[in-house]
């Protein structure tokens, strides 16, 4: 079986091979720190050997629960935010027919919708209206069990589900994914008797896609979680290699850190398949929350090409030269479509007649790579043989392992997110949450100034 491949050739006009080679020992030290659990954030290393330790029984339990939701629901609402949301959405969108939600017959797959990842009143109003005549279920995902966005959406949805489907059916089609002991989501699940799955203590949100956080919604969507885990487990082996040049995660971490040292402060993750849009969102959280601290860190951003070549292309080609690109490129699409020939050739496109649409896409990709490198943008290339569960599993683990190594190279704790609390404290103070009286007074005084 082929693996995903990283090519850094097009960065070597910007950084020297010698400097890159000097990362060999540093990267090895970072990997050892991860393995031995002796570095910062070592309470959160449960993701490191997660793929190879997931048991068949656990997968069977997830699939059986998914089947209950599939059999009893037309729509399943996945409620969660950040790490409790993005991984599932990334895989579901990548593996689903782009127009499935518009089709009458869904081939037994419930429509998956998302909630709890914003506080938009219109969003929630429109969602609850859409659900009014639907047999729907809910997967309530929150590690802390207290995240406001998710808890608020769940409060609305739980009531609606019970009102529409009755208490007994609601109990069958509401599943909780949360902490083993603490948090409101755990209390509710235990009291109501919901089926629940535990998020391991030692796996942080953004590293949790291969726990029930991601695996349950993905299985409900009819996507093969065995293959996803198998791809990740195979990549776990590949990324254990101590040789820098043979370990894609180590090489990616080293290259991006050397680029950062050379003034490339922004990384743009690029796809040429719109289905990967949410994969990029997942990646942005993984790297943004892991590295953006202590006044350091590459700013992770993303674009969908060729769409965004018509919006962001100008900036990337000629704006401030502080960027580099990492392209996730799918070698072979899952479907084949040829450009038809047209006798009149009014649109002048007969030079493309007979070619696969993907050939045009690939030439757009190559042309863009050459133009961007000429324009001063280093380019890393991750080649994915096919867009399927197995390779998505490989990609997930590759980026996770690289993130752990990269964070240690940067000398930050890649596994905490202290900055996320700042807005919450202010929001709770402004909303007069019990326990925030002092903060509330301080913030009111500040607003009066
Ligand atoms: O990576 C993280 O830790 C965060 O993005 C969390 O996943 C997010 O804030 C949601 O938290 P919780 O699962 O506790 O609701």
Image (cartoon, rainbow, N blue to C red):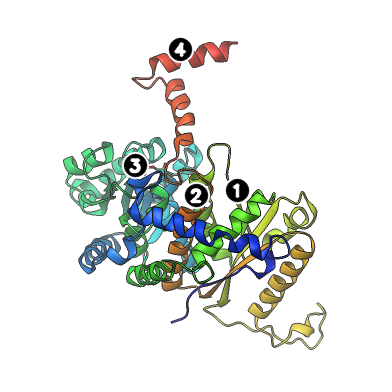
Q: Which residue is mark 2?
A: 407
Q: Which circle, 2 or 3, is nearer the viewer?
A: 2
Task: State the separation of the CA atoms marked 2 and 4.
Answer: 38 Å
Q: Which residue is mark 1?
A: 298
Q: Which circle, 1 or 2, is nearer the viewer?
A: 2
Relative to 239, residue 114 above or below: above
User: Does 371 sit left or right of 291 as displayed?
Assistant: right
Q: Which mark is residue 154?
A: 3
Chain-order first, disc 4 or disc 1: 1
| Marks 1,2: beta carbons within 8 A | no
Task: State the separation of the CA atoms marked 4 and 1.
Answer: 36 Å
Chain-order first, disc 1 or disc 2: 1
Task: State the separation of the CA atoms marked 1 and 2.
Answer: 10 Å
User: Which residue is at a point 65% across and 65% down the rendered structure image?
Assistant: 17
User: Is the distance from the Cβ of mark 4 to the nearest ligand 1 atom less than 8 Å?
Assistant: no
Residue 294 visible within the image: yes
Q: Which residue is mark 4?
A: 441
Secondary structure under the numbered disc 3 in the rendered image? helix
Front one among 285 and 43: 43
User: Does 61 sit left or right of 297 as displayed?
Assistant: left
x and y, in percent, of residue 271 in the image = 60, 64
Relative to 98, residue 350 above or below: below
x and y, in percent, of residue 119 in the image = 47, 37
Quarter of the image where one finds residue 302: bottom right
């Amino acid at each position: 079986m082929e693996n995903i491949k990283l090519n850094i050739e097009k960065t070597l006009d910007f950084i020297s091979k010698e400097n890159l080679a000097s990362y060999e020992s540093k990267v090895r030290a970072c990997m050892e720190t991860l393995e031995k659990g002796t570095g910062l954030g070592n309470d959160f290393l449960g993701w490191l050997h997660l793929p190879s330790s997931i048991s068949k029984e656990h997968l069977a339990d997830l699939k059986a629960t998914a089947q209950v939701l599939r059999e009893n629901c037309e729509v399943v609402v996945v409620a969660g935010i950040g790490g409790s949301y993005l991984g599932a959405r990334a895989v579901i969108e990548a593996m689903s027919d782009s127009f499935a939600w518009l089709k009458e017959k869904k081939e037994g797959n419930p429509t998956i919708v998302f909630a709890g990842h914003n506080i938009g009143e219109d969003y929630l109003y429109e969602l609850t209206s859409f659900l009014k005549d639907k047999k729907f279920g809910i997967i309530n995902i929150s590690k802390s069990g207290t995240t406001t966005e998710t808890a608020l959406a769940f409060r609305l949805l739980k009531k609606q589900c019970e009102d529409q489907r009755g208490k007994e059916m609601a109990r069958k089609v509401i599943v909780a994914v949360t902490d083993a002991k603490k948090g409101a989501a755990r209390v509710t699940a235990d009291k109501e008797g919901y089926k629940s799955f535990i998020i391991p203590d030692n796996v942080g949100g953004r590293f949790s896609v291969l726990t029930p956080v991601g695996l349950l919604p993905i299985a409900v969507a009819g996507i093969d979680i065995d293959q996803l885990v198998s791809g990740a487990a195979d990549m776990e082996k590949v990324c254990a290699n101590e040789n820098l040049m043979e370990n894609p995660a180590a090489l990616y971490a080293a290259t991006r850190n050397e680029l950062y040292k050379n003034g490339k402060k922004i990384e743009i993750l690029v796809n040429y398949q719109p289905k990967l849009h949410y994969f990029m969102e997942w990646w942005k959280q993984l790297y943004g929350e892991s590295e953006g601290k202590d006044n350091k860190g590459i700013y992770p951003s993303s674009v969908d090409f060729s769409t965004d070549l018509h919006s962001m292309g100008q900036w990337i080609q000629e704006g401030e030269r502080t960027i580099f690109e990492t392209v996730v490129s799918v070698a072979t699409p899952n479907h084949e479509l040829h450009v038809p020939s047209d006798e009149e050739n009014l649109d002048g496109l007969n030079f493309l007649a007979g070619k696969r649409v993907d050939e045009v896409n690939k030439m757009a990709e190559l042309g863009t790579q050459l133009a961007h490198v000429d324009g001063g943008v280093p380019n890393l290339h991750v080649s994915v043989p096919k867009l399927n569960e197995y390779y998505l599993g490989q990609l997930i683990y590759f980026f996770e392992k690289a993130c752990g190594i990269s964070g240690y190279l940067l000398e930050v704790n890649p596994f905490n997110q202290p900055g996320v609390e700042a807005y919450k404290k202010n929001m709770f103070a402004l909303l007069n949450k019990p326990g925030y009286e002092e903060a509330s007074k301080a913030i009111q005084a500040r607003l009066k100034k």
